[in-house]
Image (spheres, coloured by chain):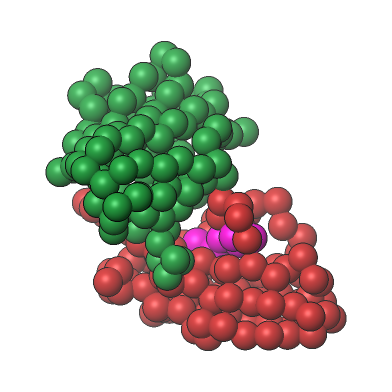
Chain colours: A red, B green
Amino acid sequence: ETGVTQSPTHLIKTRGQQVTLRCSSQSGHNTVSWYQQALGQGPQFIFQYYREEENGRGNFPPRFSGLQFPNYSSELNVNALELDDSALYLCASSSKGGTSGNTIYFGEGSWLTVV
Amino acid sequence: AQTVTQSQPEMSVQEAETVTLSCTYDTSESDYYLFWYKQPPSRQMILVIRQEAYKQQNATENRFSVNFQKAAKSFSLKISDSQLGDAAMYFCAYRETSGSRLTFGEGTQLTVNP
């Protein structure tokens, strides 16, 4: 049990639609990262938020956007969904500057299927 | 850019035996962290072991140990006394000391045979 919760766990969307995925970080963690994991592949870094600001981005187009709220929870938004967006989306939280050595904890992920 | 390579897509081991999973990485940094994560069918990413690059001593966590060769940029995971519950996808990952971004390899699917 990592204390990182994600919702929804599974969802199906139609190509062209928009989706919002949510993540509650572990208590005391101020940094949230999002990863996309396609079937049979390793997770790919999408972006990271620290104190409500985007703090690093991977090779993903602008239709992937995010938010971090004052309580450090986060949202991942994907617009104009494409079939290739079908994947497991993982949220990870950590504490930048903390004494935990920046241990990163993952949620159980949100499975997105685009049809 | 940092890259992580796992050259073994699949591995299998007999219960109670020992298995080693391989990982190589590329970076120009001198200080960084390396990790092995386990991902069972539930898809929860579970930290198995971590290694700080500035430490020469190899990390050990119970039945799990690593062989960290900094000059060769190699970071293998040894699982001793393999158990059925060890069956999962294993990912090697790299992280700079200053950030929280993880770079993952493609994974090794480990099967444990009874």
In this rendered view, identify the residue nearer to me: B34 or B100: B34
Q: At which x and y percent is residue A104?
A: 36, 56
Give the residue at the far left of this rendering. Answer: B62
In this rendered view, identify the residue nearer to me: A71 or B77: B77
Left or right: A55 as drawn, with respect to A106: right
Q: At which x and y percent is residue A108?
A: 43, 72
* Residues shaded magenta: A32-38
Q: Quadrant of residue A60?
A: bottom right
Q: Quadrant of residue B12?
A: top left
Q: At which x and y percent is residue B104?
A: 52, 45
Q: Quadrant of residue A25?
A: bottom left
Q: Can residue B109 be seen from the camera position used here?
A: yes
Question: Residue drawn at (26%, 47%), measured in percent from left and top?
Answer: B15
Above or below — where is A8 with respect to B29?
below
Q: Magenta segment, principal secondary structure?
A: strand
Q: At which x and y percent is residue A24?
A: 41, 78
Above or below — where is A16 with respect to A93?
below
Question: Residue drawn at (31%, 43%), measured in percent from left and top?
Answer: B14
